[in-house]
Image: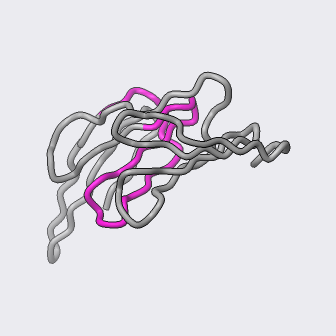
């Protein structure tokens, strides 16, 4: 089980039988608004309410890597485009839907819904 606190810390909660362990995985120092696993559970996207998306690989205990950063409008949500882990789609509060190449953060396509999204 993965969860985050308001301060931007990602935790894992490992439960086995009657024992449990809480571990700090990474600290991105920004409030995390949502967590999304890739279809094969190898990558976890951390979406902040400040317009940044980080990638975290649970199997490789390291820091989260900033992959997307928007200045024009904050991300409301993001998710992987399946099949695979190469692309994600995001929507901003201003109503812009974007498709991203996750390896280098390149925006491949945009569509403006011309309405505010909540």
User: Which residue appears farthest toward the top when viewing the image?
Assistant: 71
Quadrant in the picture for residue 115: top right
| Position of residue 29 measured from the top left corner of the image (x, y, whole percent) | 40, 26
Residue 80, placed above or below residue 15: above
| Position of residue 85 measured from the top left corner of the image (x, y, whole percent) | 35, 56
Q: Is residue 76 magenta?
A: no
Q: Is residue 71 left or right of residue 1?
A: right
Residue positioned 61% across, 22% down in the render: 71
User: Which residue appears farthest toward the front when viewing the image?
Assistant: 108
| Position of residue 65 measured from the top left corner of the image (x, y, whole percent) | 31, 33
Residue 31, placed above or below residue 11: above
Q: Nearer the viewer, residue 65 or 4?
A: 65
Q: Is residue 30 magenta?
A: yes
Which residues, given as a range, are shown in magenta?
27-53
Q: Is residue 109 left or right of residue 80?
A: right
Quadrant in the picture for residue 62: top left
| Position of residue 6 measured from the top left corner of the image (x, y, whole percent) | 47, 37
Residue positioned 49% across, 43% down in the render: 100
């Amino acid at each position: 089980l993965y969860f985050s606190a308001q301060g931007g810390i990602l935790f894992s909660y490992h439960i086995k039988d009657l024992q449990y362990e809480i571990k700090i995985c990474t600290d991105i120092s920004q409030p995390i608004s949502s967590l999304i696993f890739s279809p094969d559970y190898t990558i976890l996207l951390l979406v902040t309410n400040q317009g940044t998306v980080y990638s975290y690989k649970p199997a490789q205990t390291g820091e989260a890597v900033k992959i997307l950063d928007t200045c024009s409008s904050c991300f409301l949500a993001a998710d992987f485009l399946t099949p695979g882990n190469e692309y994600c789609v995001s929507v901003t509060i201003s109503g812009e839907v974007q498709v991203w190449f996750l390896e280098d953060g390149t925006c491949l396509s945009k569509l403006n819904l011309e309405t505010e999204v909540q």
